[in-house]
Image (cartoon, grey):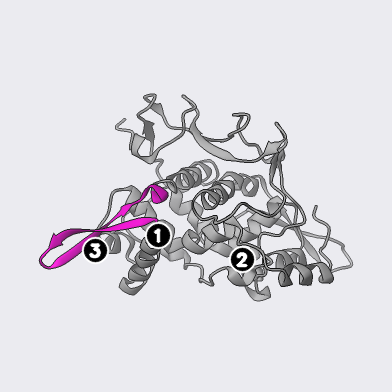
Amino acid sequence: MIAPMSKATAQKIHSEPRPMSPLVAALNLIGDGWTFLILREAFFRVRRFEGMRGNLQIPRARLVERLTALVKGGVLVRQPYQHNPPRFEYRLSPMGRDIFQMTLLMKTWAEKWRTEKFPHLALHHRDCGEHLMPQLCCTACDTQIKPDSVVFPMDQPITCQGELLHKRRSLPADVYDRGTRREAVMETLKVIGDQWSIAILYEAFKGATYFEDFCTRTGIARNTLTLRLNHLVAESIFEKHKYQESSHRERYALTPAGTGLLPVVLAMEAWGACWLSEAPPQQPATVHADCGNSLQVKLVCKACHQPIDARHVVVDAN
């Protein structure tokens, strides 16, 4: 459990300029529901504006906004496919293809914790010919990452730079029930399809349990934090307990389903560190307790233990 941060410490961290953390940088670029839904279409090889708009039933202006940001951020590449009149399609860059690892982990989580809500989409790994079962591993010792083996630096919140998180509203639940696809990633996005929920989860993985600690360590407005915590309780990610019978103070404990989201968040942080960090981190590193090294992760196929490349994964014909 994280010890409550004093007001003086919080003010000091807020006032000291620090480079943006990889997770905050990733959340600002891809940390909202519409963006992940657009990227999901790209992984299904839907590359044209009208195809995405029809499949997602997304407002035209919102799609333009998100595609523009993804092209500017280097995740998508805009290429002409017709010159008269000019028309363009949007293809994943290497940076964009690397996000596939996050979507696989989202799929894996939902297939375990939301099994009754959708048909499973079986994937095949061309490298070994086996059904694909993704596994997040430590690059140093090559063993699977387990929640109790991850040691976070406790004195550095995800963002007492909370004001640097782009303010986007979470999508209404019915958005995830629209469109032409019904599969596992949608169910995970219903739970954590916004940057605030992921920021809260990250601090919970580090040991935060009380409302005031989440508020201080994330910089999230109190009303927004209340809404997100209630949402995560309703989705069985947190359980809410009375801290003291004589007090209104409550604590939020991660459930097994909540703990199961750790690989998704670690993969997002790793993606930000790989593609968005401008300088080495100037803060204590997260450590993998099993080997004692700074934690760096890789996603591999459980069958052959080779890194997973989106181009080598296909929908299983069986």
Residue 111 at x, y percent in the picture = 49, 42
Label 3 or label 2, whichever comes before in sequence order: 3
Q: Nearer the observer, disc 1 or disc 3?
A: 3
- Residue wearing tag 1: 177
First in sequence, mark 1 or 2: give its number: 1
Q: Residue 208: percent from the left, percent from the top?
A: 75, 57
Q: What stretch is highlighted in magenta?
A: 73-96
> Which residue does the numbered mark 2 point to in the structure image?
228
Q: How crowded is mark 2: few (under 14 residues within 10 Å), some or many (20 or more)?
A: many
Check residue 50 in the rendering and tell me which mark sits there, or answer none.
3
Which element type, helix, strand or loop, lies under badge 2? helix
Q: How many marks?
A: 3
Horizontal placement of 93 versus 291: left or right? left
In the rendered image of this protein, does residue 312 appear above or below residue 267? above
Any mark on residue 235, and which? Answer: none
Quarter assignment of residue 198: bottom right
| Residue 176 visible in this rendered orientation of the protein | no
1 vs 2, front mark:
2
| Residue type, label 3 | Glu
> Of 194 and 98, which appears nearest the observer?
98
Left or right side of 236 for 250: right
Q: Which residue is drawn at 62% across and 72% down?
A: 163
**Among the 4 quarters of the image, the one containing residue 200:** bottom right
Task: Residue 115: give x, y in percent of width and height.
Answer: 49, 43
